[in-house]
Image (cartoon, helix red, strand yellow):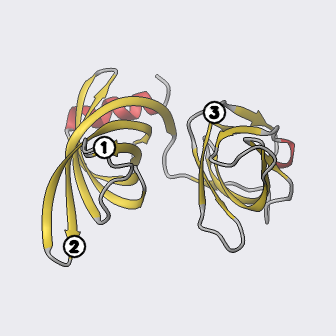
Protein backbone atom coordinates (compact mmCIF):
# COMPACT_ATOMS: atom_id res chain seq x y z
CA UNK A 1 0.00 0.00 0.00
CA UNK A 2 1.34 3.45 -1.00
CA UNK A 3 0.28 6.20 1.46
CA UNK A 4 1.05 9.90 1.06
CA UNK A 5 0.32 11.45 4.49
CA UNK A 6 -1.33 14.86 4.84
CA UNK A 7 1.28 17.53 5.51
CA UNK A 8 4.02 15.81 3.46
CA UNK A 9 6.50 18.04 1.65
CA UNK A 10 6.72 17.08 -2.03
CA UNK A 11 9.32 18.46 -4.46
CA UNK A 12 8.46 18.89 -8.14
CA UNK A 13 11.21 19.60 -10.66
CA UNK A 14 10.09 21.21 -13.92
CA UNK A 15 12.29 22.26 -16.88
CA UNK A 16 13.81 25.77 -16.66
CA UNK A 17 12.47 26.58 -13.17
CA UNK A 18 13.54 26.24 -9.56
CA UNK A 19 12.23 23.14 -7.73
CA UNK A 20 8.67 23.69 -6.48
CA UNK A 21 7.94 22.69 -2.88
CA UNK A 22 4.34 21.53 -2.36
CA UNK A 23 2.53 20.41 0.79
CA UNK A 24 -0.11 17.68 0.59
CA UNK A 25 -3.41 18.75 2.18
CA UNK A 26 -5.01 15.32 2.59
CA UNK A 27 -3.87 11.73 2.91
CA UNK A 28 -4.16 9.60 -0.25
CA UNK A 29 -3.64 5.85 -0.65
CA UNK A 30 -3.41 3.25 -3.40
CA UNK A 31 -1.99 -0.22 -3.94
CA UNK A 32 0.34 1.01 -6.71
CA UNK A 33 1.84 4.37 -7.74
CA UNK A 34 -0.11 4.48 -11.01
CA UNK A 35 -3.39 4.11 -9.07
CA UNK A 36 -2.83 7.07 -6.74
CA UNK A 37 -5.77 9.50 -6.89
CA UNK A 38 -4.99 13.21 -7.44
CA UNK A 39 -3.24 14.67 -4.37
CA UNK A 40 -4.65 18.01 -3.13
CA UNK A 41 -1.68 20.31 -2.50
CA UNK A 42 -0.89 23.83 -1.38
CA UNK A 43 0.76 25.64 -4.30
CA UNK A 44 1.36 29.23 -5.33
CA UNK A 45 0.10 28.77 -8.91
CA UNK A 46 -3.05 30.56 -10.05
CA UNK A 47 -6.05 28.85 -11.65
CA UNK A 48 -5.40 27.26 -15.03
CA UNK A 49 -1.60 27.03 -14.68
CA UNK A 50 -0.37 23.58 -15.70
CA UNK A 51 3.06 22.17 -14.90
CA UNK A 52 4.57 18.81 -15.78
CA UNK A 53 7.74 17.53 -14.17
CA UNK A 54 9.45 14.92 -12.04
CA UNK A 55 7.95 14.58 -8.58
CA UNK A 56 9.90 13.42 -5.55
CA UNK A 57 7.00 11.56 -3.97
CA UNK A 58 7.33 11.09 -0.22
CA UNK A 59 5.18 8.28 1.13
CA UNK A 60 4.81 6.71 4.57
CA UNK A 61 7.19 3.91 3.55
CA UNK A 62 9.78 5.78 1.54
CA UNK A 63 10.46 8.02 -1.43
CA UNK A 64 10.30 7.54 -5.21
CA UNK A 65 10.42 9.71 -8.32
CA UNK A 66 7.63 9.81 -10.89
CA UNK A 67 6.33 12.04 -13.71
CA UNK A 68 3.45 14.21 -12.48
CA UNK A 69 1.14 17.05 -13.49
CA UNK A 70 0.22 20.01 -11.28
CA UNK A 71 -2.98 21.85 -12.15
CA UNK A 72 -5.53 23.73 -9.99
CA UNK A 73 -3.83 22.65 -6.73
CA UNK A 74 -4.14 18.97 -7.72
CA UNK A 75 -1.05 16.81 -8.24
CA UNK A 76 -1.62 13.81 -10.51
CA UNK A 77 0.78 10.97 -11.30
CA UNK A 78 0.89 10.72 -15.12
CA UNK A 79 3.86 8.43 -15.71
CA UNK A 80 5.32 5.29 -14.29
CA UNK A 81 8.21 5.31 -11.86
CA UNK A 82 11.43 3.71 -13.20
CA UNK A 83 10.22 0.74 -11.13
CA UNK A 84 7.20 0.47 -8.89
CA UNK A 85 9.59 0.10 -5.96
CA UNK A 86 9.71 2.79 -3.35
CA UNK A 87 13.13 3.55 -1.85
CA UNK A 88 12.60 2.51 1.75
CA UNK A 89 13.35 4.88 4.55
CA UNK A 90 15.57 3.71 7.36
CA UNK A 91 12.75 4.31 9.85
CA UNK A 92 8.95 4.69 9.93
CA UNK A 93 7.83 8.35 9.87
CA UNK A 94 4.87 10.09 11.47
CA UNK A 95 3.43 13.41 10.36
CA UNK A 96 2.52 15.78 13.18
CA UNK A 97 2.45 19.30 14.50
CA UNK A 98 4.82 19.39 17.48
CA UNK A 99 5.70 22.86 18.90
CA UNK A 100 9.46 23.38 18.95
CA UNK A 101 11.94 25.94 20.27
CA UNK A 102 15.69 25.82 19.97
CA UNK A 103 19.02 27.22 18.94
CA UNK A 104 20.47 26.98 15.42
CA UNK A 105 24.16 27.18 14.62
CA UNK A 106 24.84 29.08 11.40
CA UNK A 107 28.13 28.47 9.59
CA UNK A 108 29.28 31.22 7.24
CA UNK A 109 32.44 32.85 5.91
CA UNK A 110 32.48 35.06 9.01
CA UNK A 111 32.47 32.02 11.32
CA UNK A 112 29.77 30.50 13.47
CA UNK A 113 26.91 32.20 15.27
CA UNK A 114 23.84 31.07 17.21
CA UNK A 115 20.24 32.19 16.67
CA UNK A 116 16.99 31.36 18.45
CA UNK A 117 14.29 29.62 16.41
CA UNK A 118 10.67 28.64 17.03
CA UNK A 119 8.38 26.48 14.95
CA UNK A 120 6.90 23.02 14.69
CA UNK A 121 8.08 19.56 13.72
CA UNK A 122 5.83 18.40 10.86
CA UNK A 123 7.34 14.98 10.22
CA UNK A 124 9.42 12.78 12.55
CA UNK A 125 11.09 9.37 12.67
CA UNK A 126 13.71 7.74 14.88
CA UNK A 127 16.29 8.86 12.28
CA UNK A 128 15.35 12.53 11.84
CA UNK A 129 12.71 15.21 11.31
CA UNK A 130 11.24 17.95 9.16
CA UNK A 131 11.05 21.30 10.96
CA UNK A 132 9.14 24.41 9.83
CA UNK A 133 10.59 27.34 11.77
CA UNK A 134 11.39 31.03 11.90
CA UNK A 135 13.64 33.36 13.85
CA UNK A 136 10.72 35.51 15.02
CA UNK A 137 11.84 38.55 12.99
CA UNK A 138 9.00 38.28 10.42
CA UNK A 139 11.28 36.97 7.67
CA UNK A 140 9.68 34.31 5.43
CA UNK A 141 12.78 32.06 5.52
CA UNK A 142 15.41 30.80 7.92
CA UNK A 143 18.92 32.25 7.50
CA UNK A 144 21.01 30.19 5.09
CA UNK A 145 23.79 27.94 6.39
CA UNK A 146 22.27 26.23 9.43
CA UNK A 147 24.60 23.33 10.18
CA UNK A 148 22.97 21.94 13.30
CA UNK A 149 20.27 22.75 15.83
CA UNK A 150 19.55 21.95 19.45
CA UNK A 151 15.77 21.52 19.75
CA UNK A 152 13.21 21.16 22.54
CA UNK A 153 10.17 19.45 20.98
CA UNK A 154 6.79 19.06 22.69
CA UNK A 155 5.83 15.42 22.18
CA UNK A 156 2.88 13.38 23.55
CA UNK A 157 5.07 11.97 26.36
CA UNK A 158 6.61 15.35 27.28
CA UNK A 159 9.56 17.44 26.13
CA UNK A 160 12.15 15.82 23.88
CA UNK A 161 15.61 17.40 23.63
CA UNK A 162 17.66 16.55 20.55
CA UNK A 163 20.60 17.73 18.51
CA UNK A 164 19.94 17.66 14.74
CA UNK A 165 22.39 17.81 11.83
CA UNK A 166 20.97 19.61 8.77
CA UNK A 167 20.50 17.51 5.63
CA UNK A 168 18.47 20.00 3.55
CA UNK A 169 17.29 23.56 4.14
CA UNK A 170 14.77 25.49 1.99
CA UNK A 171 12.95 28.68 2.97
CA UNK A 172 11.38 27.97 6.39
CA UNK A 173 11.86 24.17 6.15
CA UNK A 174 14.78 22.25 7.59
CA UNK A 175 15.22 18.48 7.28
CA UNK A 176 17.81 16.86 9.50
CA UNK A 177 19.04 13.69 11.14
CA UNK A 178 19.37 13.14 14.86
CA UNK A 179 22.90 13.48 16.17
CA UNK A 180 21.89 13.01 19.81
CA UNK A 181 18.71 12.84 21.91
CA UNK A 182 17.96 12.29 25.58
CA UNK A 183 17.87 8.53 26.33
CA UNK A 184 14.25 8.47 27.58
CA UNK A 185 13.03 10.07 24.34
CA UNK A 186 14.82 7.48 22.20
CA UNK A 187 12.55 4.72 23.53
CA UNK A 188 9.41 6.86 23.50
CA UNK A 189 10.04 8.13 19.97
CA UNK A 190 10.46 4.59 18.63
CA UNK A 191 7.16 3.62 20.28
CA UNK A 192 5.43 6.76 18.91
CA UNK A 193 6.68 6.25 15.33
CA UNK A 194 5.57 2.61 15.43
CA UNK A 195 2.05 3.81 16.35
CA UNK A 196 2.07 2.33 19.84
Looking at the image, residue 45 sits to the left or right of residue 48; the answer is: left
User: In terms of depth relative to the viewer, which is nearer, 58 or 39?
Assistant: 39
Dot 1: element: loop
User: In terms of depth relative to the viewer, which is nearer, 86 or 8?
Assistant: 8
Residue at x-position 13% and y-position 62%: 113
Which image quarter is the N terminus in?
top right
- Look at mark 2 in the image and give the residue it sits on: 108
Task: Kindly identify which numbered label has been placed on residue 25.
Answer: 3
User: In terms of depth relative to the viewer, which is nearer, 98 or 177?
Assistant: 98
Looking at the image, residue 140 sits to the left or right of residue 53; the answer is: left
Circle 3 Cα neighbour tier, 10 Å, few/some/many (<14 / 14–19 / ≥20): some
Can residue 188 be seen by looking at this rendering? yes
Looking at the image, residue 67 sits to the left or right of residue 135; the answer is: right
Q: Quadrant of residue 19?
A: bottom right
Circle 2 Cα neighbour tier, 10 Å, few/some/many (<14 / 14–19 / ≥20): few
Of the two numbered discs 3 and 1 on the same chain, state the one appearing first in sequence. Answer: 3
Of the two numbered discs 3 and 2 on the same chain, state the one appearing first in sequence. Answer: 3
Residue at x-position 42% and y-position 29%: 97
Circle 1 Cα neighbour tier, 10 Å, few/some/many (<14 / 14–19 / ≥20): few
* Nearer the camera: disc 1 or disc 2: 1
Of the two numbered discs 1 and 2 on the same chain, state the one appearing first in sequence. Answer: 2
Alpha carbons under labels 1 and 2: distance apart: 22 Å
Dot 2: element: strand
Alpha carbons under labels 3 and 1: distance apart: 25 Å
Residue at x-position 85% and y-position 59%: 80
Residue 37 at x, y percent in the picture: 82, 37
Image vertical order of residue 120 relative to residue 90, above or below: above
Task: Kindly identify which numbered label has been placed on residue 138.
Answer: 1
| Circles 3 and 1 in contact, beta carbons < 8 Å | no
Residue 84 at x, y percent in the picture: 79, 56
Q: Quadrant of residue 52?
A: bottom right
Q: Quadrant of residue 50?
A: bottom right
Amino acid sequence: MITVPAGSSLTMRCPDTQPIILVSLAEVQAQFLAELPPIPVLSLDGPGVRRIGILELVTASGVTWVEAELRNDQLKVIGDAPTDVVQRRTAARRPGNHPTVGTAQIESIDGRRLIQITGRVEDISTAGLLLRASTGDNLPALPYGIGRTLLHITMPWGEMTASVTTVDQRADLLRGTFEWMDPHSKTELARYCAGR
